[in-house]
Amino acid sequence: MSKFKKKPKADPGVSTASLPDIVFMLLFFFMVTTVLREQDLLVEQRLPQMTQLQKLEKKTLISYLFVGKPKNTSLYGTEPRIQANDVLIGTKDILLWVNQEKDKLSEAERDQITISMKADREVKMGPISDIQFELREADARKLMYASTGKVEN
Amino acid sequence: MPKKKVRVSQEVNAGSMADIAFLLLIFFLVTTTIASDKGILNILPPKQDPDQPPPEIKLNERNIFNILVNANNQLLVEGEYLENTDRLAEDVKIFILNFGAPDEDAMALYNALPQSLKSQANRSPESSDHPMSGGAVVSIKTNRGTSYERYLEVLDQVKKAYFDIYAERVGMTTDQYRTLTGKTAAEKELLDRGKEGIPMAISIAEPDKIGGN
């Protein structure tokens, strides 16, 4: 009989001692894979969903342009605007901005600069083609239309 | 008199460690975004010299696959009204792979194609001459009022047609081919073998002024 009595005592419960380790691993994963957002977005961003996406390898060569309806419509109006770094710029300022971005790169990489255009899906082609024209003028011809993947059914 | 408790372990209680780590984890989850550098690549044409008119390129009408998108996001593909872009990739693929009037190089290209692509290649004289440069060109013309999403959708489908062909040439799926980066020599070789002789000839015309802002 004594053998049966001992059994309930032996149940120690699930050990939670390794829980911190698991959580720490998750924590490190997220810390490594994510980057802190460097800038506040001043324009709305709902990227279009596409299927034929390609990934860019060299992240140092990428400069970002955000296009969309301003979030603060009372200050900036409702027409789509361009955001570069932390400010809203006009179409004519793109040339200057591209040259500033090119200056940040080394001499050999300057012509490889890639512009990643993060445009809201509501934007019309008018502003987009104006930007493309300016980029051609600035000789930054590698352009990427940033978009998210679409789940194919 | 209560019995004096006997302390057995002298270790620091690590039970709250999980809570601290969870707090940190939630902080990072909330404040960070996974960088998504994915998108559709496009190479813009070189800058135009205002003194020089754009060079006249003689192309036969049959060598141009016209896609027009108007301000209401309606599609006109080769003079035919299309409701959506579902069939577009397939149509573009048939157009590119047409060998209507191939020259010697194009015949060599045709003979080098794998059997699965050969069976899709037509010899219709009304469609494009051959897929090589000087042959088939896909032209996308939008309006200033066309939505950006619609334009990308069309570009996406045209790219899909090309990637399908490239991938089939090297015997991969389209998704596999697209993820090739060309970093290693083997990957670069695959990339080049897919593209060889069939340049991605997508012409994006300056949009019309009507209906835009």
Image: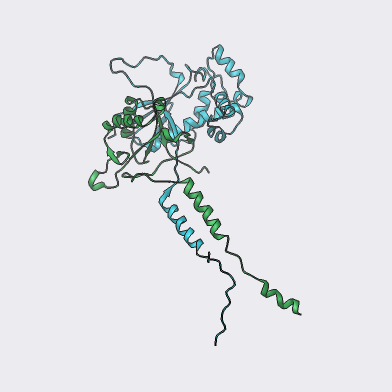
User: Viewed as shown, does residue B12 lie left or right of B152?
Assistant: right
User: Viewed as shown, does residue A113 lie left or right of B107?
Assistant: left
Residue B5 locus on image (x, y percent)? 57, 79
Disc tally is 0
Q: Is residue A119 visible?
A: yes
User: Which residue is outermost to the bottom?
Assistant: B1
Q: Quadrant of residue A48?
A: top left
The colour assigned to chain A within the rendered structure = green
- Judging depth in this view, the residue of B163 and A23 nearest the camera is A23
Residue B31 locus on image (x, y percent)? 40, 51
- Judging depth in this view, the residue of B1 and B209 nearest the camera is B1
Residue found at x 27% / y 47%: A72
Q: Could you say which chain is coloured cyan in the image?
A: B
Residue A140 locus on image (x, y percent)? 37, 27
Q: Is residue B80 visible?
A: no
Q: Quadrant of residue A81?
A: top left
Residue found at x 23% / y 48%: A74
User: Which residue is outermost to the top?
Assistant: B104
Decide: is B171 above or below B99: below
User: Which residue is outermost to the left?
Assistant: A75
In the rendered image, which quarter contains the N terminus of chain A?
bottom right
User: Viewed as shown, does residue B169 lie left or right of A123?
Assistant: right
Q: Quadrant of residue B112?
A: top right
Decide: is B148 above or below A133: below
- Judging depth in this view, the residue of B180 and A20 nearest the camera is A20
Residue found at x 48% / y 58%: B21
